[in-house]
Image: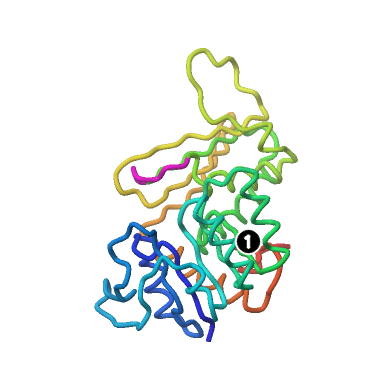
Amino acid sequence: MLKLVITGATGRMGRMLIEAALNTSGITLHGALTSPQSDSIGRDAGDFLGQKTGVLISNDIEAALVGADCLIDFTRPEATMDYLTACVKHKVNAVIGTTGFDEAGKASISKASQSIGVVFAPNMGVGVNATLKILELAAKILNTGYDVEIVEAHHRLKVDAPSGTALKMGEVVAEALGRDLNECAIYGREGVTGVRDDTTIGFSTIRGGDVIGDHTVMFLGNGDRVEISHKSSSRTTYATGSMRAALFLAQHPTGLFDMQDVLGLKS
């Protein structure tokens, strides 16, 4: 049995992950971590489900990782760095679904993967990753005469923008078109912007309500447009994808991977 530690255990995503771990064959819940300020410390990790798991919610990273095989983290970049340091120390693999990392943070994740197995992906959902593969094909076909715009919407509590998934979509399209997203991305327009540059990939961000995650990539030509969308109605797909990632790492003890690797979608 793969022994799993879940961070952010009292949050919406953390609870989804705990429920998924309890219902996934080959996985057992080993630890549940939360912030030191949480009033849930000491409670059973399955209380919200009306189940007793025998795993108490804690903020002791070191103790939680003793004997563990893998940690799944959907928190904030600064917390992820602390968890990752402890994972390297204890030789525990890591599945990272946190978004909003700067280049230094991404470099730290890459360095950690030299010692442990890491799946790092902005979206663990199987459907989203199928969409990424479709976008790669679409961009190669619609490589001339089409402008690219990406629109994403999330709940009002999301703190980073554009979403990690939107950025990943942009990276996939840019690479298929032979462009560097860092050079061609536009994240906002205001006032007199001038005529659109043919190489631009534009991003638009919407924040409001309880939207879990909507993403649309538009290829806009003269006379037609192609829109490829993915809409999430539940976080369940992120949790089940994360379980697959954790099981994947059991066979890959070192290296940096993404969900395309986990799903066998890389050509």
Which residue is found at the position 50% from the left and 40% from the top? Answer: 162
Secondary element type, mark 1: loop
On screen, residue 115 versus residue 8, left or right, reads: right
Q: Position of residue 235 (x, y in %)?
A: 39, 61
Q: Is residue 254 above or below residue 226?
A: below
x and y percentages locating residue 177 in the rendered image:
71, 41
* Residue at the limit of the structure toward the left, as seen here: 50
Q: Indicate whether residue 30 is drawn in magenta.
A: no
Q: Quadrant of residue 94?
A: bottom right
Question: Is the residue 83 above or below the residue 66 in the image?
Answer: above
**Closest to the observer, 94 or 214:** 94
Is 135 situated left or right of 48 in this image? right
The front one of 215 and 252 is: 252
Q: Amino acid at mark 1?
A: Asp
Q: What is the quadrant of residue 252 in the picture? A: bottom right
Main structural element of the magenta stretch: helix, strand or loop?
loop
Q: Residues within 10 Å of mark 1 (few under 14, many from 20)?
A: some
Looking at the picture, how far across and down is residue 116, in whole percent? 67, 69
Q: Quadrant for the C terminus, please.
A: bottom right
Task: Name which residue lies at 51% across and 80% down.
Answer: 3
Q: Is 157 colored magenta in this rendering?
A: yes
Q: Residue at position x 53%, y 56% from top? A: 80
How many labels were placed on the picture?
A: 1
Left or right, 152 with respect to 105, comes to left
Numbered range of the magenta stretch: 155-160
Residue most toward the top?
192
Q: Which residue is mark 1?
A: 258
